[in-house]
Image: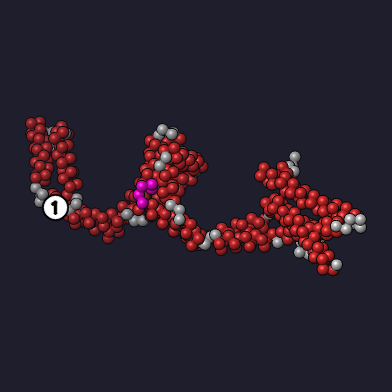
C-alpha cells in the first residue's frame, strides 16, 4: 500500500509542517481579527466618532495582511489557483535557482584560497593525532579497516585475481628479455670480483661433501676397469682418485690465484658476454624461462600461494587478537603519538593535506557544484516547493503577521494625520 505524503516526510519535516500550520493559523487569525474589528468599528463609528481610528487601523491591517499573504503565497504557488504573472516563482524557476545556488557554492566556498585558509587555521594533524593516540580509537580504526579489507577480499574472484596476477607477471616479468639484464649484472659482478665469495663457498661446500662421502668413490673408476685387474689395484685406483680430488679442492681453497679460479672467471666473463650478445644463448635462456613459468605446476603453485595468502589474511583480519590486528592498532597509536608531539611532522602533514584539498577543489569544483544543480533539476517542482516551504515557510508567516501589525499602525497614522489636517 503506497504511503501518504505525510508518511514520506522525515520526523523533522513533520515537525516543521506542524509549526508552519500553527503560524499560518496565527497569521490568518490576525487577518480575521482585523476584519471583525473593521466591521464593528464601521458599524459603530456614526455613534462613536473615535472608532474612526480603529476602523482605519483595521483597514490598514487587512490591506497589509492581504498584501503580504499574496507576496508569500506567490513564492510557492498561484494565489487562489489563479495563474497571475510572476507568481509560483519557486516551481517555475526551480532549475535556475539550482544553477544559481551551485554557482554561488562554487564561487564562494569551493575556491582554493578559501579552502587553504580554512585548513591552515585548523591543525588537522594534531587533532587527528590526539584522536588516534587513544587506544580505543586506534582499535576502532583497525577494526573498521579490517572489516573493509575483509569485504574486499571476499568480493574478489579467485580466478580473476589469479588471471590478473598472471597477466601482470607476464607483462612485466616474463615479456621483457632476461638474458641481457642478467648478463649485464653478471659482468659487473665479475669485474668487481664480487663472485669470489660465492666461489669460496662452493669450494668449501665441495670439500665438506668430499670428507663426508668417502664411500661414494668406491667403484667410481674401478668398475670401469677390466675384470682381470686385481681388486687391490681397483681399490688403489679409487683411493687415488678420491685423494687427488681432496688435494685439488684444498689447493683451490689455499690459492687465490689457482688456475681453477681463473678458469671460473673466464667462464663467467664469457657467459656474461653471451647472455648480452649471443642470440643462441639468449634464446636458450628465454626458452628455459618460458618453459618454467608456463608449466602447469607453476600455475598451480601460484594459485595455491594466493589461496593460502587470502585465507591467512582473512583469518588474521577477523581475529581481534591476531598479530596483524594488534600490530595495526599499535602502529596507528604510534602514528597518533607522533602527530601529537612532532610539530615538524604536523606541519608537513597539514601542508600535504592543504595542497591535496586545494588541488582537488581547483580541479573538480565545477563537478562538485554541479551535484547541487543536477540534484535540484531532478526534483519534482511540487516536491521542491514543499521542501523549501517547510524550511522557510514558518518564518515567512511572520511577514504576514508583521504586515498586519504595520498596516494597522500605518492606517491609524494616516487617518490621524488626514483628520488633523483636513479638520
Which residue is under mark 1? 262
- The answer to which of 244 and 138 lies nearer the viewer is 138
- The answer to which of 272 and 309 lies nearer the viewer is 309
The N terminus lies in which quarter of the figure?
A: top right
Query: Taking 38 as reference, is 176 left or right?
Result: left
Q: Residue at x 72, y 45 (%)?
A: 18
Q: Is 374 rendered above or below residue 240? A: below
Q: Is residue 340 magenta?
A: yes
Q: Residue at x 49, y 42 (%)?
A: 148
The picture places residue 328, in percent across and down from the top left corner, at 40, 40
Q: Is residue 366 magenta?
A: no
Q: Which residue appears farthest toward the bottom when viewing the image?
A: 422
- The answer to which of 68 and 158 lies nearer the viewer is 68
The C terminus lies in which quarter of the figure?
A: bottom right
Q: Residue at x 88, y 53 (%)?
A: 40
Q: Residue at x 45, y 48 (%)?
A: 164
- Colouring used for the render: secondary structure
Can the viewer see residue 67 in this picture?
no
Q: Is 206 rendered above or below residue 290? A: above
- Counting labels gives 1
Can the viewer see residue 388 in this picture?
yes
The picture places residue 263, in percent across and down from the top left corner, at 15, 52
Q: Residues within 10 Å of mark 1 (few under 14, many from 20)?
A: few
The picture places residue 144, in percent across and down from the top left corner, at 48, 40
- The answer to which of 98 and 28 lies nearer the viewer is 28
The picture places residue 386, in percent across and down from the top left corner, at 72, 52
Q: Which residues are magenta?
A: 339-343
Query: Taking 193 as reference, is 284 left or right?
Result: right
Query: Taking 294 as reference, is 219 left or right?
Result: left
Q: Secondary structure at mark 1?
A: helix
Amino acid at each position: 500500500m503506497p504511503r501518504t505524503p505525510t508518511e514520506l516526510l522525515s520526523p523533522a519535516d513533520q515537525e516543521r509542517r506542524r509549526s508552519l500550520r500553527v503560524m499560518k493559523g496565527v497569521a490568518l487569525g490576525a487577518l480575521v481579527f482585523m476584519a471583525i474589528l473593521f466591521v464593528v468599528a464601521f458599524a459603530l463609528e456614526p455613534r462613536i466618532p473615535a472608532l474612526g481610528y480603529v476602523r482605519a487601523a483595521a483597514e490598514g491591517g487587512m490591506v497589509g495582511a492581504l498584501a503580504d499573504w499574496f507576496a508569500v503565497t506567490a513564492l510557492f504557488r498561484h494565489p487562489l489557483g489563479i495563474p497571475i504573472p510572476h507568481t509560483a516563482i519557486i516551481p517555475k524557476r526551480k532549475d535556475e535557482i539550482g544553477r544559481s545556488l551551485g554557482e554561488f557554492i562554487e564561487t564562494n566556498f569551493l575556491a582554493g584560497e578559501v579552502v587553504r585558509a580554512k585548513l591552515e587555521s585548523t591543525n588537522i594533524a594534531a587533532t587527528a593525532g590526539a584522536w588516534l593516540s587513544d587506544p580505543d580509537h586506534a582499535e576502532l580504526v583497525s577494526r573498521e579497516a579490517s572489516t573493509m579489507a575483509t569485504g574486499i577480499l571476499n568480493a574478489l574472484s579467485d580466478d580473476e585475481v589469479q588471471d590478473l596476477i598472471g597477466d601482470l607477471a607476464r607483462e612485466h616479468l616474463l615479456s621483457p628479455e632476461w638474458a641481457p639484464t642478467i648478463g649485464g649484472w653478471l659482468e659487473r659482478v665479475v669485474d668487481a670480483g664480487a663472485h669470489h665469495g660465492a666461489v669460496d663457498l662452493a669450494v668449501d661446500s665441495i670439500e665438506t661433501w668430499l670428507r663426508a662421502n668417502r664411500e661414494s668413490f668406491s667403484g667410481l673408476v674401478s668398475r670401469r676397469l677390466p675384470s682381470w685387474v686385481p681388486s687391490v689395484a681397483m681399490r688403489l685406483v679409487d683411493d687415488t682418485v678420491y685423494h687427488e680430488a681432496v688435494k685439488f679442492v684444498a689447493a683451490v681453497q689455499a690459492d687465490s690465484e689457482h688456475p681453477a679460479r681463473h678458469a671460473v672467471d673466464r667462464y663467467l666473463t664469457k657467459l656474461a658476454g653471451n647472455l648480452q650478445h649471443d642470440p643462441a644463448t639468449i634464446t636458450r635462456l628465454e626458452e628455459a624461462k618460458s618453459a618454467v613459468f608456463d608449466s602447469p605446476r607453476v600455475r598451480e603453485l601460484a594459485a595455491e600461494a594466493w589461496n593460502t595468502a587470502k585465507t591467512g589474511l582473512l583469518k588474521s583480519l577477523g581475529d581481534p587478537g591476531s598479530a596483524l590486528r594488534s600490530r595495526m592498532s599499535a602502529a596507528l597509536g604510534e602514528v597518533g603519538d607522533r602527530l601529537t608531539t612532532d610539530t615538524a611532522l604536523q606541519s608537513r602533514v597539514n601542508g600535504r593535506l592543504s595542497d591535496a584539498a586545494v588541488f582537488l577543489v581547483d580541479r573538480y569544483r565545477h563537478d562538485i557544484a554541479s551535484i547541487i544543480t543536477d540534484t535540484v533539476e531532478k526534483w519534482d517542482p511540487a516536491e521542491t516547493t514543499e521542501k523549501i516551504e517547510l524550511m522557510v515557510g514558518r518564518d515567512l508567516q511572520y511577514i504576514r503577521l508583521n504586515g498586519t501589525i504595520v498596516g494597522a499602525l500605518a492606517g491609524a497614522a494616516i487617518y490621524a494625520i488626514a483628520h488633523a489636517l483636513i479638520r
